[in-house]
Amino acid sequence: MLDGLLDQVLKETQRLSDEGPEAGYEAFVALTDLREKLMQAVGEQQAALTPEQKMSLRRLLELDPVILRHMQTLKAEAEQGLVRIHQSSLQREAYQPHYDVGSIMFDRKK
């Protein structure tokens, strides 16, 4: 089980490091979930890791800075998008009249 999960995480990590932020944030979320499962499996079998498994884990660690850089790029794009949304809502509110229903007065003819 650990070998299969390790291979899956390594392949997905290599794919995402090649594709970069174009892969979309959903792919990085899925990778994070896979890595969490892998870490749980490694924690259970820590004393029984083979040299091949240790080497695969080292390869994953080598790709971490690339993956982290891609994730930070996606984060920055999301932050910029949120700022644009906030600014556009502020601009829209500035041009829309605000009426206070409680302060409207009606005149009657006598």
Image (cartoon, grey):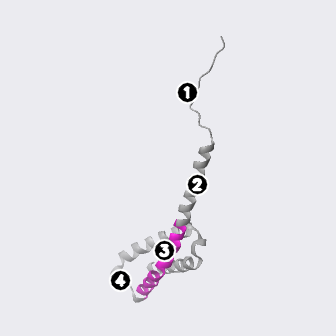
Rendering coords of residue 72 (x, y %): 50, 70
Rendering coords of residue 86 (x, y %): 56, 53
Q: Dot 2, crowdedness within 10 Å: few (<14), some or many (≥20)?
A: few
Number of callouts: 4
Please give the residue where the numbered disc 4 appears in the rendered image: 48
- Magenta residue check for 58: yes
Q: Earlier in the sequence, mark 4 or mark 1?
A: 4
Q: Earlier in the sequence, mark 3 or mark 1?
A: 3
Q: Secondary structure at mark 1?
A: helix
Q: Nearer the viewer, mark 3 or mark 1?
A: 1
Along the line of sight, the residue nearer the viewer: 62 or 77: 77
Q: Earlier in the sequence, mark 2 or mark 4?
A: 4
- C-alpha distance separating marks 3 and 1: 54 Å
Q: Secondary structure at mark 3?
A: helix
Magenta region: which residues? 52-75
Along the line of sight, the residue nearer the viewer: 107 or 48: 107
Q: Nearer the viewer, mark 1 or mark 2?
A: 1
Q: Nearer the viewer, mark 3 or mark 4?
A: 3
Labels 2 and 4 touching (C-beta < 8 A): no
